[in-house]
Image: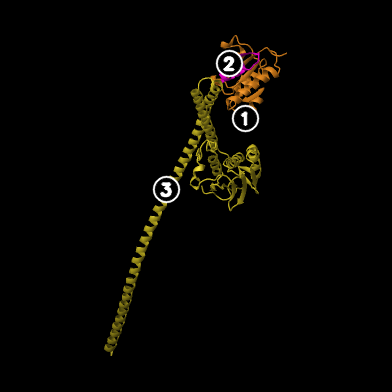
Amino acid sequence: MAEILVLGCLVVVCLGFFFVVLQVLKSKSKLLQLSAKDLQDEITIRKRTEELDQTIKNLQAEVMARKRAENELAKRAEELASSNKELDRFVLIASHDLQEPLRRAKNYAQLLEQRYKGRLDEKADKFIEYMVDGVERMQNLVRDLLAYSRLGKADLPFERVDLMKVARSAMQDLEAVIQENNATITYGDLPVVMANPAQIEQLMQNLLTNALKFRGDAPPVIGIIAEKKQHEWQVAVKDNGIGILPEYSEKIFQIFERLHDRKEYSGTGIGLAICKKIVERHGGRIWMRSVVGEGSIFYFTLPLRSTVGEPVTPTYA
Amino acid sequence: MPRKSIDILIAEDDPADVDLIKEVLTLHNGGLIVNISVVENGEDAMNFLHKKASFQEALRPDLVILDLNMPRKNGRQVLKEIKSHERFKNIPVVILTTSNAVEDIDLSYKLGANSYVTKADNLLDYQKNITALEEYWCKVASLPTK
């Protein structure tokens, strides 16, 4: 009897043991299965993490490179600004210092002319004439260069400038020329802008002077119109003059660039360069449209400003 | 009673300008004897008035024509000194200078200048202005006794 019990227990224990082993084996295989998948995942994760790391490193390197480039650019911009300032100062000083000897040369050239014209010989008269003309032209160039370079100085803060008043004042100054040419100048509703009053007056006067000077056969008809755009005022000065070929549309704004013979039209060619400098110093743009034989329209913009003088929207220089 | 003669002191550092001014002053004066003395800088101008240094024999001028930009004491300083000096302040001083700057004009009159004339850009107007100056100060205006 006891032997059967012992045998029975043994069998049970064996079975139990067997069962446990089976379970362990089963779970181990499951574990193995799990490990295999896990391993796969592990590998993928690790790979992806490495890729991500690398991407981050690349991005960081790019950001660094960009930052360095930005710093370089800022430095260059600063260098350019300071060298521009120096250039402006140089031109200012040079043209100022040139005035004195030029004045002397002109006075005495004219004195020679006054005193000796017709008293020496024809050749001498010619020489004197050339000399006086040369010196006069030099004087005009230096005077205009001085005016142009003077625009480089700081002019803020801006004031309220009524463009209607500016137009009227310019027309008054040009009264004689307007009468001579039988010209008509009209203007629409012009706004009050924040600007440097003297410079805006100069701008207006230069544009009107040109419109009168480069007239066609018909009496000049000139119009000034203002349009409010999203962030700026756009002013147009329209004329019915001789017009300008499109290929010169940029050239005319360059300093001392003239399109015509000195015999045809006077002037050193600085008027529009001054206009451009003034407009750009105010944060605006200037350009023109024209049809030869029909007339031209000169446009310029002035950004809308708060009363403090800052543009309402940032201008992208 | 019209003047017979006038003593003018020109304080001007540019000899070319001096010649021009002298020419105009002596050319069209219709019988008036114009005695011109010239100094080239501010220091000499004051020495002339004080009869000091090399100007012991100097005559007190009836009129001073003064440039603003001179070396060794500029015109502004000279003007100030003349117009604050008991003995000299009644001498008419005409500023004749290249500057047409408002600041210069205002300051000159503030310091007591009797007149301010900008040297004209072209010869003809330059000559006309100096002639007008002479006409006014020598013939139209009366001058104080020395």
Which mark sits nearer the N-terminus, 2 or 1? 2
Observer-nearest residue: B34 or A152? B34
Residue B33 in the image, given as x and y percentages of width and height = 64, 12
What is the chain identity of the residue bearing mark 3?
A: A
Range of the magenta residues?
B17-45
Which residue carries the number 3 mark? A69
Give the structural element (helix, strand or loop) at label 3: helix
Chain for colour orange: B
Mark 2 against mark 3, which lies toward the viewer?
Answer: 2
Which residue carries the number 2 mark? B38
Give the structural element (helix, strand or loop) at label 2: strand
Q: Vertically, is B74 above or below A49?
A: above
Q: Vertically, is A48 above or below A79?
A: below
The crowd level at tag 3 (other Cα within 10 Å; few <14, some 14-19, many 20+) is few
Between the residue at mark 2 and the residue at mark 1, the CA separation in whole angstroms equals 27 Å
Residue A158 in the image, given as x and y percentages of width and height = 60, 42
Q: Point out the residue furthest to the top here.
A: B57
Residue under the image location 60 percent in, 17 percent down: B10
Q: Which mark is residue B103?
A: 1
Q: Vertically, is A238 above or below B81?
A: below
Give the structural element (helix, strand or loop) at label 1: helix
Between the residue at mark 3 and the residue at mark 1, the CA separation in whole angstroms equals 48 Å
Observer-nearest residue: A54 or A259? A259
Q: Point out the residue furthest to the front here.
A: A122
Residue A172 in the image, given as x and y percentages of width and height = 66, 39
* Left or right of A74, for residue A209: right
Quadrant that contains the N terminus of chain A: bottom left
What is the chain identity of the residue bearing mark 1?
A: B
The crowd level at tag 1 (other Cα within 10 Å; few <14, some 14-19, many 20+) is few
